[in-house]
Amino acid sequence: MTEKVVERTEEKEAPWEPKIIAFLCNWCSYAGADLAGVSRIQYPPSIRIVRVPCSGRINPFFIIKSLVDGWDGVIVSGCHPGDCHYISGNLVARRRFAILHDLLDYFGIPSGRVQFMWASAAEGERFAELVTKATEIIKKLGPNDQFKKRW
């Protein structure tokens, strides 16, 4: 009768990767993300994309709610200022998010958790670079456990 030898292997924990939600403008940033994917340009797989009609349509409550719900970071991206499909939607977004940064500081949320950027449909490589930089910034901040319930 043969003896079975059972080997124990130590399970190595995978390195922590941040969970990032990205709200992307349909006309520019989403198309830039699509171009990055079609061109096989690598960017961190930890982002989940939500396509919105315009960056000006993103309610700041969506960003705060995302952080409260446990997302480690939020990326908002739209057309370059002056190139909005809806004429001034990205300018509205820029003003709105300048105020949001002050509000996040007031709440004690590190400003690096929320990243705003502009990328056009032809800038797939730029989109990948910006997402990579944003992911590194969020990774340095660590997991978002600020809103975790502690009983």
Image: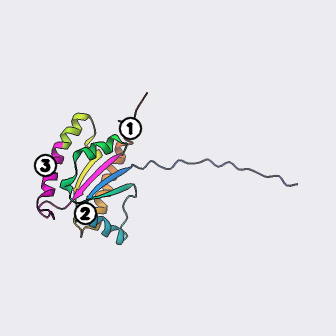
Identity of the residue furthest to the bottom in this view: 39
Identity of the residue furthest to the right in this view: 1
**Mark 2 or mark 3, which is nearer the start of the sequence?**
2
Depicted 19 relative to depicted 120: above or below: above
Depicted 147 relative to depicted 118: above or below: above
Residue 101, percent from left and from top: 20, 43
Give the Cα separation between the discs numbered 1 and 3.
28 Å
Secondary structure beneath dot 3 equals helix
Residue 58 painted magenta: no
Magenta residues (range): 72-99
Nearest to viewer (mark 3 / mark 2): 2
Other-residue count near label 2 (Cα within 10 Å), few / some / many at <14 / 14–19 / ≥20: many
Secondary structure beneath dot 2 equals loop
How many marks on residues? 3
Residue corresponding to mark 2 = 26
The three-letter amino acid code for the residue at tag 1 is Asp
Other-residue count near label 3 (Cα within 10 Å), few / some / many at <14 / 14–19 / ≥20: few
Q: Determine the residue positioned at 27% across, 42% down.
A: 64
Residue corresponding to mark 3 = 95
Q: Determine the residue positioned at 31% across, 62% down.
A: 128
Residue corresponding to mark 1 = 145
- The quadrant in which residue 104 appears is top left
Residue 50, percent from left and from top: 31, 57
Q: Determine the residue positioned at 42% across, 30% down.
A: 150
Q: Is residue 12 left or right of residue 27?
A: right
Q: Are marks 1 and 2 in contact (CB under 8 Å)?
A: no
The three-letter amino acid code for the residue at tag 3 is Arg
Give the Cα separation between the discs numbered 1 and 2.
31 Å
Q: Which quadrant is the C terminus positioned in?
A: top left
Residue 97 painted magenta: yes
Residue 78, percent from left and from top: 21, 59
